[in-house]
Every structure is written in structure tokens, then in C-alpha cells.
Amino acid sequence: MKLYIKELREEKGYTQKELADLMQVSFQTISKWETGANYPDITHIPKLADIFGVSAGVLLGMEPLREEAPVKYDSEVYWNRKRDLLKVWKRLFWNEDYFRFLVKDVWKFQGPVDILDLGCGYGYLGSVFLPLLPKGSTYSGVELDGGQIEEAKEYFEGKPWDCTFYQEDLYEFKPEKQYDLVVTLFLMSHLPDPKRVLRLMKDALKPGGMILLIDANMEVEQAGYYSGLEREENGLPRPDLVPMWEYEAAHAQRDYRMGTKLPYLLKQEGFHDIQARISDQVVIYEPSDPAKQQRNEDLRFVYTHDDFYEEGTSYFLNRGLSLEKANEIREYFSRTTAYFDKPDSCAVKTSGVYFVYGKK
């Protein structure tokens, strides 16, 4: 059990001695309560809650320490917190030969292609598309974050491609021309109103132009993950994160199923020749194999990265989970970090990335 005595005491500005005087106990007792070496008698709980001005549920860690404002997954603030993680994650999306296969053998672009990338970040999609497209192809990116725009310009400087970047809110962007190909990468699942952006993309396409939406189904990815930790823990499976994602989807934060839903949304918006493929990549984490060093480092970074649960149990309580479930998930990720440190550890991660495309 995690009691929020220290956090609440510090919020109120009390020293341990001052709180001890209010509770009529020694300051050593307060210290033991805060470290978990001892727990307050049940008769102390109402008085502690009253002193801090919270419910007993908050004090006992059964309710969020503080209500979290709804997450704006389409905000610059959110994405700036995730930049380093996303740069690594992108190396786990697909194999390079598979992306080349899509461009050359599936989409079969015959002449120069004018690309518009909404939410382009530092121009990642341009960097993988342009070397594979016919000479004369161009790339334009729309991104709200000026730092990402500067990074993109720096990357493409001196490269043999015509690239243009617009620092604008994509909801307000009005293209000066129409494009052969309009793309997004992991954008649609983070939008409260994806249909609005689909209409913007359709307006930006030339007649017969192609829309390409790359996004994930997190449930598919979860089903395709396994590690030896499950065997070590007597067959206990990885915690089911779907209830948390369902809460986010119900509150218009992000849609964990978006990759699978995209063909339906394209049909609703009047696109035709709608097709979908799924990434081929399956990563095997095996630190004993030096040939897999980069993949091992990438997967370990992603699956032991604590940024998304740095707030502790409150992160999960604010997403509709019970205290028991929140503690189960936090414990599992802690065990995963320890397991990945073992030289004989092994894990399998299946990409849940969809490529969904259609014609205007």
C-alpha cells in the first residue's frame, strides 16, 4: 500500500515535527509512516485526511492524488515530451526493405510525386520516401513546433530534394496547391476529431491523388508481445492495458484501435480503392546476440521507458483503473526492467502498425 502522507505534508508545507504535533505522535512515527516502515492505526486515518483536506481514499492511494487535466494528445506540449522516445520507436515500425517494397511494388509511383505530410515533426517520412521516389519529387511538411521545423530544415539542407516546411496548426493550414500524396504518421489516433483532418487532407489532394495514413492498433501490438518474464512469473500474462485505452478513447483523448478503423473512416469520407497492409516487423530481444545490439537497445529503451507512468499510481487511477490494477501494471513494468537486464532474457514484439491508403 502506498500512503501519500509525505506528498500531502509537503503540499501543506508542514515539517514532520509540525505534523507529529498535530497528530500527537512523535516525528519518528511520521517518518516511519512516510517510508512505509510502519502504517498509521486506522483511527489516525480520518484525522490525517482532515488535516490534509482530502478524502481517506486519496490518503490511502485508492484515488488519484490529484485530478489530472484531460490529456491533449494533439498538443505541442505532449509531443515535445515524447520526441526522444518517438525517434527510437520509429526504428521499430517496419523493416526498411518492406517500406521499399510498398513504394516500389505496391504503390508503383511512375512519375515525380508531390507529398504533403501533416504533423511532419522533423521530416521523418520525407527522409524515407524521397530516396525511393522518381527524380523531381517534392516534400512539404506542416508542423506546429518550430524546433522540429528547424531540425527538419537542417536535415534536408544540401540534400537533392525540393522541401518546404510550414509552421502552422494543421487545423488552420490552407495549402497553396494540391498534392499527389498526402500522408500522416501516428497522427490520427491522437486527434479528438480525425474526420475533420481527413476532410482537410482530401481537399489538399489532386483528383485521383492518394491518401496514406500510418497508424497503430495498440491492442494488436499488445497481443503480439511476449517475454520470458511470463514464464518466470509462473505463466502470469502481461497486464491487460485495454481498459485504460478504452477509458482514453471514451474521453476523446486517443483511439488505441485507429489503425484498424481507418479504412472505415476513409470510406465514410468518400475515398475509393481503399487498401490496408500491416507492418512486417517482429523484433526479437536477445541481448546475448551481438548482431542484434541496436534492436536490443531500441526495444529495451521503449519497454522500460518510464515517462508514461512517471506520475506513479495516479497515472493509472486517472485513466479509470482500480488501485489493484494500477499497482499490478506498475509492478510488471518494474519487473520488466529487471528482467531485461539479464543476459539470458528474451522478448518478442510485433508491430501493430497499419498502412491504410485510398484514392480521392
Image (cartoon, rainbow, N blue to C red):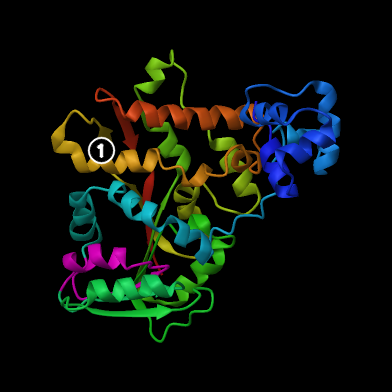
Residue 173: % across, % down: 48, 79
x then y, percent, for residue 140? 33, 76
Residue occupying image coordinates x 67% and y 55%? 69
Residue 207 placement, left or right of 285: right
Q: Residue at x 47, y 47 (%)?
A: 307
Residue 205, placed above or below residue 239: below
Does 271 sit above or below residue 61? below
Q: Nearer the viewer, residue 15 or 350?
A: 15
Residue situated in front as seen by the camera: 245 or 345: 345
Measured along the vertical axis of the image, is residue 16 above or below residue 153? above
Query: On the image, which quarter does residue 26 sit in?
Result: top right
Instruction: Check disc 1 and report the residue beneath it.
Output: 296
**Residue 113 seen in this snapshot:** no
| Range of residues picked out in magenta | 109-134
| Residue 216 located left or right of residue 34 | left
- Which part of the image, by quadrant, shows the N terminus? top right
